[in-house]
Amino acid sequence: MGFKFRTLLYISVLSILIACKKEEPTPVAPLNQAPKTAQASMLYISAFSEFPAEIEGCSCNFSNDSLDYSAQKFIYMNDFKQTSFIKVNGVLTKFTETSRKDVDSINVISTYNNADYEMIIEMEDKGKHGPESSIKTGTIKLTDKNGKTLEKAFYGECGC
């Protein structure tokens, strides 16, 4: 009986171990990074810190928030004229202003285009920040040729 009991116990333990097969964890993309397959099919704006050569002197520089602005991580720059830059899907992309509307004394809507995208900036003046600059907040609305749209809030400054 001792041999049968040990054999039965051995078979039971072995069956339990086989039944409790460990599954490999499924890799998950970090929260701040879209999966690579999704990145190709969606729009995203990323930060950059290098000033494009076309941006000299007076400019507007916008970031995701005041912390990114202090760290000089910009999502938008313009030259106070008609040229703007954002980094779309990892590529620094140039835009030309096609229209500008002063809604009132503190709100402006500007439209920019290039061959691949339309960008609408809705900007609100939040007041002076030093003698030659002012704080701005608002939204960037980016639309590609296929109609995909991204809307993103910003914080930044315009000045000289």
Image: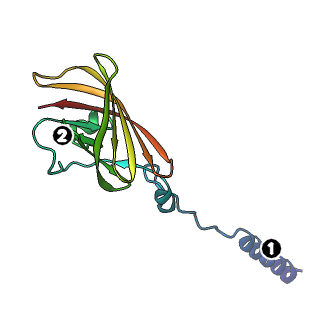
Residue at 38% across / 55% down in the picture? 89
Relative depth, front residue between 56 and 11 = 56
Residue type pointed to by label 2: Asp
Residue 93, above or below 121: below
Q: Is residue 71 left or right of residue 150?
A: left
- Tell me the quarter of the image containing the N terminus: bottom right
Residue at point 77%, 78% (across, down): 10
Pick the residue in front: 129 or 146. Answer: 146
Q: Which residue corresponds to mark 1?
A: 12
Choose top left, top right, bottom left or bottom right for residue 130: top left
The residue at 87%/81% (across/down) is: 4
Q: Position of residue 107 (x, y in %)?
A: 32, 22
| Residue placed most toward the observer, 44 or 23 | 44
24 relative position to 111: left or right: right
**In the displayed structure, would residue 66 be above or below residue 35?**
above
How busy is the neighbourhood of tag 2: few (under 14 within 10 Å), some, or many (20 plus)? some
* Element assignment for label 1: helix
Kindly report the distance in space between the C-alpha atoms of the residues bearing marks 2 and 1: 76 Å
| Viewer-closest of 79 and 63 | 79
Where in the figure is residue 96, as x and y percent of width and height? 28, 44
Residue that lies at the very extreme toward the front in this rendered image: 98
Q: Residue at x 17, y 23 (%)?
A: 129
Q: Can you say whether 8 is above or below 45 in the image?
A: below
Horizontal and vertical percent for residue 21? 68, 70
Disc 2 target residue: 79
Question: Disc 2 or 1, which lies upstream in sequence?
Answer: 1
Taking 62 as reference, is 134 above or below it?
Answer: above
Which quarter of the figure has residue 20? bottom right
